[in-house]
Amino acid sequence: MSEQATFQLSNRYAQLGSEFGQQIPPHSVTNPFVFLWNDSLADELGITPENGIRLTQRAEYFSGNRLLPGSEPFAMAYAGHQFGNFVPQLGDGRAHLLGDVCDSLGNYRELQLKGSGPTAFSRNGDGRYAMGPAIREFIMSEAMHALGISTTRCLSVINSDETVFRETPQRGSIVTRVAASHVRVGSFEFFAARGNYPALEKLADYVIARHYPEITNDTSDRFVQLLDAAMQKQIALIVDWLRVGFIHGVMNTDNTALSGETIDFGPCAMLGVYDRETVYSSIDRQGRYAFGNQPTIAQWNMARFAETLIPLVDKNEEKAIDKVSEVISNFPQHFINAFHRMMANKLGIFRTDETSKKLIDELLELLQERQLDYTISFNWLTRSLSSTIAKQQALKDFGNWFEHWQHHLEQQPQSADESQQLMQKNNPQVIARNHHMEAVLASCLETGLPDAANDFLDVLRSPYELTDKTALYQDAPSHGDRDYKTFCGT
């Protein structure tokens, strides 16, 4: 095999111009080694020995000690509303965009190192990433991908001899994040706040070409279309989060990706007992990003995106505001339609009507009132269509509602088997439960070995199937997880 690598990155975002960020190399680390590696994702991206990336080179390339062919590392500039407060400059303070590559399906994916050293945007930070949060991001992003949810993914966790000081000293890690792109609402806010409308238009056209090529109208109307298309992706994403009980924890505009992917797995967690007001993030003291608030926040974030597009939509500001306001005002109806369709699927209902919507609303009230586990409850309901034991449990939990639901299913032209199959596709058998996540992280940190993480990942990568190891991770925490807290990891 030739020593010359055939794997090659391009740098389409960095080529937009120096005002979009800082060209800067990662900082090297001492003794990097592979802790977690995503074989299937590497194959998709062509990061293989056959393409010149030898196994022995992985740690050097994905720690930032050595640059991949074609890479011109770039720290992206962006702003953002954090917990509702606008910060005019944030940017990649510990990340380097290496470039993008066309994957095996013909889609361009960006590779970004996270924890690869300080940049101009570090704001006195050390630019590093601790081992615990790095492992969490790898596991959570893979779990979300397996659940069928649009998400950034992790190619690797590379550890080193560097020490990172957070709540306690930890080994330093570098994550390679893979995304359709890393452009956020905050990227648009950065240029809008500076009145840099040429750069704003260049960014908008870049996003249209990359994520919404169906928008071909070469007039100002394309920016209204962009707003609507991005909003639809956010609605689909949030509905999917609610389907599996995912709580992002920090839905700031700088964490709202224009690709519609889930990005930033710092203080995220999974819902146990159903409660719309559940908050696990230690920094969300007011409950802004509670489980049930996520749709409202998504609309708020899209409204901030709409504001940045006003100068591009129409020279007449009043007309521009009217156009973008009309799009944003449609968010609630689009969301509730998508939400009811999703919940109907979870209940094996093929057609949403007023009766099914009433059943959905009543079930959610019962889950809330009776403090029932979200994932386990839907598993009982799914199994109740073929198991007497599960039916008895569901009757105990839901009483008359259960009988009304079964009667509704009987009125459908589809069979009970078809209803159950629909439910099985939408209700995971297993999720990345918080207490199991913490146990896995503790084991990895204590032993310095990835075994616990790999065992967990083996199950999480088949969330809709019962394997011989699924039961090890299905249980709810014995004392509940209301006091559980997550941290942003910075």
Image (spheres, rainbow, N blue to C red):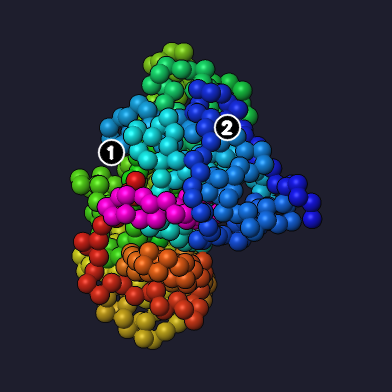
Q: Nearer the viewer, residue 172 or 333?
A: 172
Q: Residue 240: x, y in percent?
A: 44, 54
Q: Residue 443: x, y in percent?
A: 37, 69
Task: Look at the picture and state if 135 lies above or below 488.
Answer: below
Q: Nearer the viewer, residue 457 or 118?
A: 118
Say whether residue 117 is visible. yes
Q: Quadrant of residue 168?
A: bottom left
- In the displayed structure, does residue 248 sit left or right of residue 263? left
Instruction: Please give the name of the residue rendered at 51% of the width and 54% of the height, measured from the top-left corner.
Output: 31
Amino acid type at circle 1 is: Phe
- In the displayed structure, does residue 471 sit left or right of residue 142? left
| Residue with the mark numbered 2 | 13
| Residue with the mark numbered 1 | 83
Q: Nearer the viewer, residue 467 or 229?
A: 467
Say few, some or many: other residues with alpha carbon within 10 Å of mark 1 (under 14 / 14 to 19 / 20 or more).
some
Instruction: Please give the name of the residue rendered at 68% of the width and 52% of the height, measured from the top-left corner.
Output: 53
Instruction: Please give the name of the residue rendered at 35% of the width and 38% of the height, measured from the top-left corner.
Output: 125
Say whether residue 302 is visible. no
Q: Residue 485: x, y in percent?
A: 26, 57
Q: Secondary structure at mark 2?
A: loop
Q: Quadrant of residue 9?
A: top right
Q: For the magenta stretch, what is the residue range?
A: 155-179
Please tell me how many numbered marks the rendered image carries: 2
Instruction: Please give the name of the residue rendered at 47% of the width and 43% of the height, measured from the top-left corner.
Output: 116
- Cα distance in 3D space between marks 2 and 1: 28 Å
Lower position in the chain sequence, tag 2 or tag 1: 2
Q: Nearer the viewer, mark 2 or mark 1?
A: 2
Q: Secondary structure at mark 1?
A: loop
Q: Residue 416: x, y in percent?
A: 48, 76
Looking at the figure, which quarter contains the N terminus?
A: bottom right
How would you classify the magenta stretch by its main secondary structure? strand
Amino acid type at circle 2 is: Tyr
